[in-house]
Amino acid sequence: MTGPVALELRFVSTRPTPAAIHRMAKWALDVLEQPSPTAMLSADRRPLVYRNDRQVKLLHVSLDQAWPGDGHPPRREGPNTMIHAQPLRDAVEDLRVSHELSMARQPNHRDWDALGEDEEDGYPRFDPRDRWDTEIPRPTGDAARDRFNASLLAWSTYQNLELSQKRLLITMDRLVDGVISSAPYQISGSGARDGGVRRSLELVDLVERHETQRWQDLLSFPLALPLPGLPENSSDRRTFRDALYATMEDFRGRWPLLRDLVVPIKVTMLVVPPQQGKDLDNLALDVLPVVHEVLRPHVEPWHFTPGLIDEGDPTATQTKRKRDQALKRLKSLNAQSVTAYQVVELKRRPEHPPQGLLRLTLGLGDGYDHRAQSLWRRTDTRLWRKLHGL
């Protein structure tokens, strides 16, 4: 491909010590591009997907650390790498068509309401009857009963936190998806919106201002973490990283709900590149290690769910043994890690600073009851099914 690209990478690793997700992505992005003239490669080596990884304007990466280890059964899906690449113009057109079809089905639907639940949006469903468990058992004077009540309270507290974090993260995912779908022509390299229809200059300007406002609203949203300006050269990287740590620590202090993460997370980076450009893979190399160290997300946090204590119950004993084995297995993995991330590069505008802009949002990661997949891949699949009446 010679133009802008939308790229999704999914890694399944069965190694006991896999590389970090951002390093796997860096390797793949480099392999898929034009080899350098000095590379020792075979004569038939040609670029696999694009000439330069700066052509990638939409990037989605997910990692399944599927090493079985002790007490963890192997999965049928072996080690592999899935690569889904398409011209950005095709991905943008799919997003536009899908959004307009969804709005046409509901003519009275306000634009921002389209950020609500979709039967095919790929996120876990919630039972509307799910509520926080607010009952606190009172002391009974019976030691065994009080121990059981204490474990029940710990389990309820954990479930309340898990439910709250899932709902918040899925809401943020849908917010990001909604803005990308309704204003895809603000993505860098996407060209101008016309939908194949000739429009007056006044209408084009109105649509442009509306789409720009959508992205400005997202970039200024309270849960869209404003990160420092991108480094313009290598000497600025240390200052940039120090500022990243300070900003992430401040964010963690302001949002107690996300202080102790009990669900896997996805990181979305919204980027307005600096004037000289910026490789998306190198951006992840700077940002994700800070997210890992400060927020400390876990790849399989469900193993920490408190169990109900019932001494002498063989089922509870067996469950605890399996959990201990799973946690032992995770000690050799990159356990403190996001399981998915995506980068969206936006068009530069005259009002943007020379060093560009960077915003970070959190969403629901890959694992447990959710497989993280890019919006453009889900949209492509959805349109294909509708086209074939499936």
Image: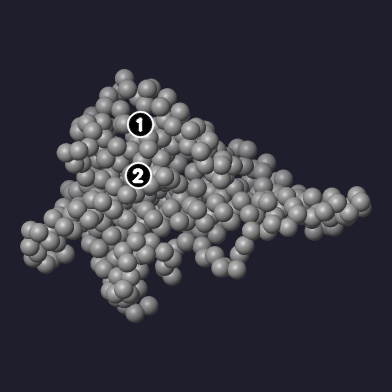
Secondary structure of the residue carrying numbered label 1:
loop
Please tell me which residue lies in front, 371 or 107.
107
What residue did someone put label 1 on? 228
**Can the viewer see residue 19?**
no
Q: Could you say where residue 356 lies in the image, as x and y percent from the top left?
A: 26, 35
The amino acid on which the numbered mark 1 sits, given as a three-letter code, is Pro
Please tell me which residue lies in front, 27 or 242.
242
What residue did someone put label 2 on? 220
Secondary structure of the residue carrying numbered label 2:
loop
- At x 28%, y 44%, the residue is 345
For marks 2 and 1, the one nearer the N-term is 2
**Can the viewer see residue 382?**
yes
- At x 54%, y 65%, the residue is 126
- At x 60%, y 68%, the residue is 129
Q: Could you say where residue 376 lies in the image, as x and y percent from the top left?
A: 32, 58
Residue lying farthest to the top in this orientation: 235
The amino acid on which the numbered mark 2 sits, given as a three-letter code, is Ser
* Number of numbered discs on residues: 2
Q: CA distance from mark 2 to mark 1?
A: 14 Å
Image quarter where the C terminus lies is: bottom left
